[in-house]
Image: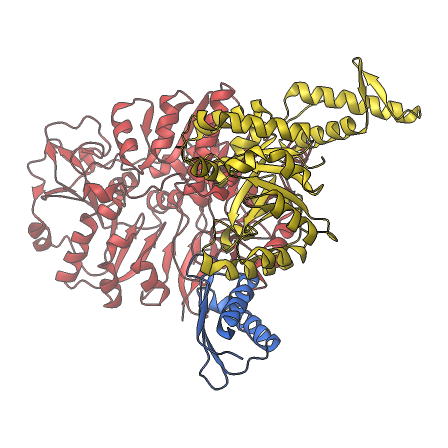
Amino acid sequence: MLEKNSMAGSLESNDILVELFHDHKGRSIDLESPVKEQFGDEIISVVNEVLDQYGIDDVLVILKDKGALNYTIKARLKTAIARGQK
Amino acid sequence: MSKTFDGIKEYQYINYEFSKNKALQLDNKLVTLEHLKENNVFFDGMTISFHHHLRNGDYVANMLFEIIEELALKDITIVASSIFPVHKPLVELIKNGNVTSIYAAYISGEVADCISAGYLKNPVYLHSHGARARLLLNKEVTIDLAFIAAPSVDKSSNINGSEGPSSCGVLGYAYADALVAKTVVAITDNIINEVNDIEISGTNVDYVIEVDSIGDANGIVSGTTQVTKDPLGLLIARNATKVIEHSGLLKDGFSFQTGAGGISLAVAMELEKIMIKNKIKGSFASGGITAYLVNMLEKNLFEKLYDVQCFDLDAVASIKRNKNHHKMSASFYANPYDRNNIVKDLDVVILGATEIDLDYNVNVTTTSNGVLMGGSGGHSDTAAGAKLTIIVSKLIAGRISVIRDQVTTITTPGESVDVLVTDYGIAINPKHQELINNLKDNTNLKIYTIEELYKKALALTGIPKQIKLSDEIVGIVEYRDGTILDYIYKVK
Amino acid sequence: MDTYIRSALFIPANNPGMVQSNELLEADAIIFDLEDAISINQKDSARFLLDEAFQFFEKTDVVRIVRINPLETPFFYDDIALVKKFDIDFIMLAKASVESVKQLAQELVDTNIKIIALIESAYAVIDIENILKASSLVKGILFGAEDFALDMQIVRTKKSDEILVARQHLAITCKALNVFALDTPFTDVEDFEMLVADTMKARNFGFSGKACINPRQVNYVNEVFSPSLEEITYALEVIESATKAQLEGLGVFSLHGKMVDAPIINRAKLTIENAKKAGIKYE
């Protein structure tokens, strides 16, 4: 479970900025992305998969995407989760 | 209504003959804008043309828009060679119905967004540079008034683009207008005794208007980019040059054109190295001219430059002083009905793409979201004319693959496109089996089918959801000969 | 020694743009940097990114090197744990010493991962022989002249006279102990003329490759370290003679009065492979 708010990634090209807010009931995912129409659903699905993996059901996820590929999204999210757990 | 495109044809040359015989003397023609307004030069429903050679430093087109607004003219058709962000005042005129039709080879900035949003009453007409000459010279469009920004006008009302404080080099996209328009108005900030080069003869000119300034010199040469510093862009340029080297075309007499994008310019740089190393003397380089091509001319790598528009100050300076740097009209450049058209003599052209599909069709008109952001310019002309058409592009940018199943809008048909060079590898149109074998046998270049490259892209990005475009047509994309290639749809 | 690395390009492991296009940059080896390129509070982020990247991207011909943090930092063991999950060719050990090499080698006992020792202090330069002998997993070194100069309290110059003896000492020791030596990167990323001169110097001292800190340096470095036509011709002769000898059932044979055995034949094959990589055409 998340103990505190956390953040990972950046707004550089090919990256994604992930912010997690732990004091939140249920899962909410807010996505800002230049490819929202083309890949929005996929990005959210990737995020949900990772949250499932870590058993996190109460979190607000704010994503500011700059065209990150899936592996980057997973990495940044996992980093933020680890930082939120310490 | 125009026919649908059904393949690239052989076109019959037309013997163009135009003769206006207006008196040359400037005195009788020198008037004010007020005078024109008061004398019914402007009226509802008219067709007005202008050129884009002053690019984002242009003051003249906006003077025209002010007049249209002031006189509350309605149903005006604008025939512009290109439209840039500087032409923003046109947006209000479109929204208010003053301007209801537009023809252009390239549209960017807020005017493009406005058209994509559906404000223009009639669908915008997008054509190539060569096709604009055809539209005018073949009298498919009647120009009531040509509003020509003229860097220098002399006492015989002759016009020259390469002299004056707002010099733009060549006025290639204004020649046809001067020949066919019912009324020709030249707007200048530099009246002199005698121009040192007559681009547009005073025999075509009806009125001359003198203003303080026709443009901002800094903005006039805003069309060029620098050679890319991105190592992947440089890699693409190196590999594109290797393709040229193995095409059999790189020998004495070689002719070449390249775009003004960062990677395209890098190809010119790489080519220069090879041509110097192998002591190759080319016949000509053409198109929009930049410092890089001027450099190659001065190093004697080409005998001539054929210039239809100057992209930077070096080109402007060179065209003035170098007799081998030639001015040319849009018709001479790329009109398929002009027997002298230069593009048919091109060996190699380097072009960009927003999208390319599995049939090698290329889109430089809209984004993947269907928004208007450009247009053919010389793209479909040079692709058709050149023996070897090479598209240079990164495979993926911002998670979007340049390769698609089908392009959102067809600007240039695949049958005129030969090679795609990306950072992940090269795809060659299957009709060039010999080139494919040559490159595979003699180089380390990664040669794939376009389907294979597409798969690579999708493996990285994932499969994108199809963007649904609306049904409402806001634009028509025509091919060089006037047949319809595709439509542009309203963006929600 | 089987690996032939002309160019080894450093990329920051926390930079997705560079990580995902690494194999396109034409370097023979990529050094995914977890050390100096990554600030302390992003070490975790870099590790997660590499973890996901190595899962997502297939291995290609490009040699994969990961530069890990020194033994004396809190990151050493976590970095090693990450690398061990994947098919990585080398770990580059920053601030290598006999002690840290031994520790690292112990961790790598049941893997195929080899070690490149980063020699970047006065002591490491004089202790190079012991460092190389500290483990048979050490297959090569990289000379880190910037940190070396800091340690020596001397000024680094483009002309590089101040590192002349260190370079030669390292190159000679590596040759004697049959490990490869990679030269220090050239830090002025806009000066390609000096880059080429500096790289040629390195080659002439006996380095077999050089590190790059900017992708635009890679092509220049590759060209300097690519086999010459003479080397290629000799390699072709070796291979042809070796094929003949094999048919005749001979293990070793003589060419131009010199004995040719397995290492020389392997080296010849590598030369031809690299000639191909360099795009050099030959009969």
At x 50% / y 55%, what residue is drawn?
Answer: C14
Depth check: give the residue in front, C281 or B329: C281
Chain drawn in yellow: C
Depth check: give the residue in front, C221 or B100: C221
- x, y percent for residue B335: 40, 40
| Total numbered circles | 0
The quarter of the displayed image where residue B46 is located: bottom left
**Vertical comparison of A20 with B255: above or below:** below
- x, y percent for residue B278: 52, 20
- x, y percent for residue B265: 42, 37
Q: Is residue A64 visible?
A: yes
At x 80% / y 13%, what residue is drawn?
Answer: C257
Outermost top residue: C257
- x, y percent for residue C68: 57, 51
Quadrant position of the N terminus of chain B in the picture? bottom left
| Left or right side of C69 for C250 | right
Chain A's colour is blue
At x 46% / y 45%, what residue is drawn?
Answer: B352
Chain drawn in red: B
Outermost right residue: C249
